[in-house]
Image (tube, grey):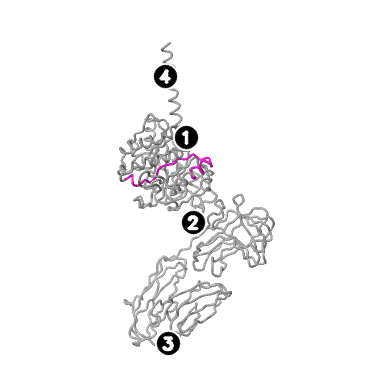
Amino acid sequence: MKLKFFLTVVSVFYTVQIFSQNYAFTMNAKLGMGINLGNAYEATGLGEWGVNPDSTYFVDIAQKGFASIRIPARWSAHALTQAPYTIHQYFMDTIEWAVKQSLKNGLYVVLDMHHYEEMFQEPAAHKERYLAMWEQIAEHFKDYSDSLYLEIFNEPHDNFTPELWNQYLLDGLEVIREKNPTRMVIIGTAEYGNLSGLSKLQIPSTDTCLIVTVHYYNPFDFTHQGATFAGVTATNVKWDSTAAQIQAVKNDMEIIKNYSISKNVPIYIGEFGVIQNADDISRARWAGHLRKVFENYGFSAAYWEYCSGFGLYDYALDCYYNGLLKALTDSVGECDCAMYDTIIVKNSTFKRGLNPWVVYKNEASGAQAQVEIINEEARLEIIKNSTVEWHIQFVYPSFPITMGSTYTMVFDVYSSSNTPLTAQISLDGGTYAVIHDTLVNVTDTKQTFSTTFTHNEPSIKKARMVFECGTITSQYLYFDNIHIYEVVKGVPVQTITIQLPESQTSAQITTKQGSLQLSADVVPANATNTDVVWSIISGGQLATIDNTGLLTATGYGNGSVRVQALAYDGSGVKATKTIYISGQTSSIDVNRTNCSVKIDENEYIISGNTIQNIEIYSIIGQLRTKIQGVNNSEFYIPKSYLAQNMNVIKIVTDTGVHTVKFFKK
């Protein structure tokens, strides 16, 4: 009888233990393939590293097939440095919002303590603060579901040694367990969370709600190629899935698996990733191989990271590295970053609201319109149209256009009734001159339109994409998937060096009204346009220079002349050189009364000794360009400064204001 009772008790106890151990493995499996929301909340300040999440981030991560999200948080940057070490409410609220957004979208959440830099140097001095912050975090999130996991500390290293970490993790775990007795807690390794620290990691065998995490960035010269912050300067390192590469991964995984078996603890690869400096094919191949390996070994994982330097999504370009994304989750994004060299338009699918898209209405004409997001499309409502196209415009502002580049504009559009629609690229300011446009016929069926052009004029710093809607008779227009691709990239000038003739070793003119032929050495030699605009930026009364670089002394005075060669391609690259003038009349001719303004082969003679300022207007009075501080007797105006058709040029000299007109064909 007694023996039977004893056996029953042992059987029940053994069953409970097995269930508890299985529970940890079950909870780890739920993390599946996840992703890190890196460079957001672990930055030195919110948004300081370029990632400032809104609700669409969490929606997108879930839609792309990720099961979990790891939220690195730098609590130490947002808490008092003296007791009681209170975490600032704004930061607690921010992290809680991110946790709620994740859970709302069906994501399991790993919340960690990240980048507590002071602990790495003086762990003992910061131990009390570390525990106090965990006491607050544990209290704040104690009532959340078991879909929230807590990770005690990210990547201890330097003076935060493996031996010291083994002590501090027990203290942190004890604090967490006071309010969260059964919550899954994740414990990482010292030595930057690497595999090397795994053998030194000691975890309590009595706590069956633990997961061990290891970070995996091998081979490091591949995953961090070109990352000077990590001391890696090598680039163009490939991952070709060679037998040696695959074996190296297997060897590492066996070490992790053996630890898991010996400690009876599940494994979470909390970080693995490869920098965007690596080629897209290698990134995808490496990530895809690791995904299969992790699945085979029963490890959960989180890719590092969503939308920064290692990311699979480029927020600025609104595109996805689809090879990498597909390797991780079998999903693809709406636009592939690898399709073209450069994708200019961001928020092209309106999943992130309207910004930076705007609607312009010419209120003086009575035109009225409004736009809103309906089913992730921009719906433009024409409340009252006009007789002029530009009286209502749907505009994407301010992006550069490079001389010699070829661009493709693509967009989806449909309307409530048939209507013509003009889509264009134009200047963003000044005359708003049209660079390229196309006319399409829009129907109530969604269609994709595209147009391609090469920009052969000087580069433009600020262009815009515009849909001209002022004369639209349809009540509604629906826009989606709007892109501008730089299909063929023009080659801008990088450097200019002003050269003397081979026969001359000194930069001087010594004969009366002598000349010096200058030339410009433009790099790279294959630049789309290697022309330069020559001008004199100081000493203009001592010499003149033509559009070939021929510098000629005026004969009036000795001294120095500062010559400039400016790249015609609009890149802004320029070079200057000082030329010394001697052998002329000993003093400058103070009776000189003419200044010269040149445009192409046209020269305008203006009364005065010095040109002070130049302003260029369109024929309707819009200021296009203002050139201040000329302070020369002559000036060459590049045609790129001028609008198509008539230009009104106001020239201010020391004797007054003068106006000339120039028609640009």
* Magenta span includes 204: no
CA separation in Å, label 1 and label 2: 38 Å
Q: Earlier in the sequence, mark 4 or mark 2?
A: 4
Q: Position of residue 243 (x, y in %)?
A: 40, 40
Which label sits on residue 29?
A: 1
Q: Dot 1: few (<14), some (14–19), or many (≥20) neighbours within 10 Å? A: some
CA separation in Å, label 3 and label 4: 113 Å
Which label sits on residue 592?
A: 3
Q: Position of residue 63 (x, y in %)?
A: 54, 44
CA separation in Å, label 2 and label 3: 54 Å
Q: Which residue is mark 4?
A: 10
CA separation in Å, label 4 and label 2: 67 Å
Identify the image quadrant of residue 111: top left
Closer to us: mark 3 or mark 4?
A: 4
User: Could you tell me how many numbered marks the image carries?
Assistant: 4
Q: Marks 2 and 4: in contact by CB < 8 Å?
A: no
Local SS, label 2? loop
